[in-house]
Image (cartoon, rainbow, N blue to C red):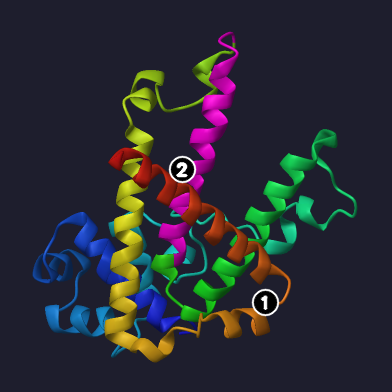
Amino acid sequence: MESNHDFARSLALLRKEKGVSQRIAAKELGISQALLSHYENGAREPGLLFVRKACDYYHVSADFLLGRSMSREGATITADELYDASAEKGNTLRGSIAATLNKKLLVNSLDLLFDLLGKVGSREAITAASNYLSDAVYKMFRHLYRAGGTQNEGFFSIPANHFLAGCTDADMTYSEADYLDALSLQAKEKGKDSFPPMNNDALAQGYPAACQSLLQIVHNTGERVNRAVEGRKK
């Protein structure tokens, strides 16, 4: 199997998410608990029949179970299919230099972040980081959408009251917890050496263009947060 590690991890996580023991899951999947344990720890690879049963049991696609898609339904999209506005030469957002500058800082930094996560190799960490950042984009867009006060909020599936009550913030918190759990598990299972070097020299050498954007965000955020903390002390 091409992605045995991803399959084993997904199989174990889906069972825990379903809230059933190995014994119960094995019985309902028609195999022994020992064999399911081997599948979940990557010691053995299942046949096609078991993969189909597991997909039906956990209500996910084979692509998701095998680690080929982040969508449970199996919808896939490749990086080449995504529109990349940053690739357009001379791209300035509606003539706003400030908007273009900040966008480039974020785009470059996210490129660097996800490249580092790709080298770490934890699909769970990548998914959690994506969920956290997607929540942030969702919040900023929805606040902008609401600002005019005349637009139909049926455009969003999350009810307005739930959004205003902080449900998206809660999802960000859970996503951050998932991110920390995934990184901790990676360090425990693969060791600290599975993480690429991230000191200033290593970043500057590996990402000569994007590194400056990340360092600018680190600096700006540090200044802003420290000012806020000092302001509360006065």
87 versus 1 height, above or below = above
The residue type indicated by label 1 comes to Tyr
Residues in magenta?
126-150
Q: Nearer the viewer, mark 1 or mark 2?
A: 1
On screen, residue 172 versus residue 81, left or right, reads left
Q: Position of residue 137 (x, y in %)?
A: 54, 41
The residue type indicated by label 2 comes to Asp
Q: Main secondary structure of the magenta part?
A: helix
Write the residue at 71% across / 77% down.
208
148 versus 141 height, above or below = above
The image quadrant of residue 168 is top left
Q: Where is residue 101 in the image (x, y as percent from the top left)?
A: 74, 49
Write the residue at 30% across / 50% down.
174
The residue identified by callout 1 is: 207
Gap between marks 1 and 2 measured at Cα: 27 Å
The image quadrant of residue 20 is bottom left
Write the residue at 61% across / 60% down.
216
Write the residue at 74% across / 62% down.
80
User: Which sits in the foreground, 221 or 28?
Assistant: 221
Q: Where is residue 200 in the image (x, y as percent from the top left)?
A: 56, 79
91 versus 186 height, above or below = above
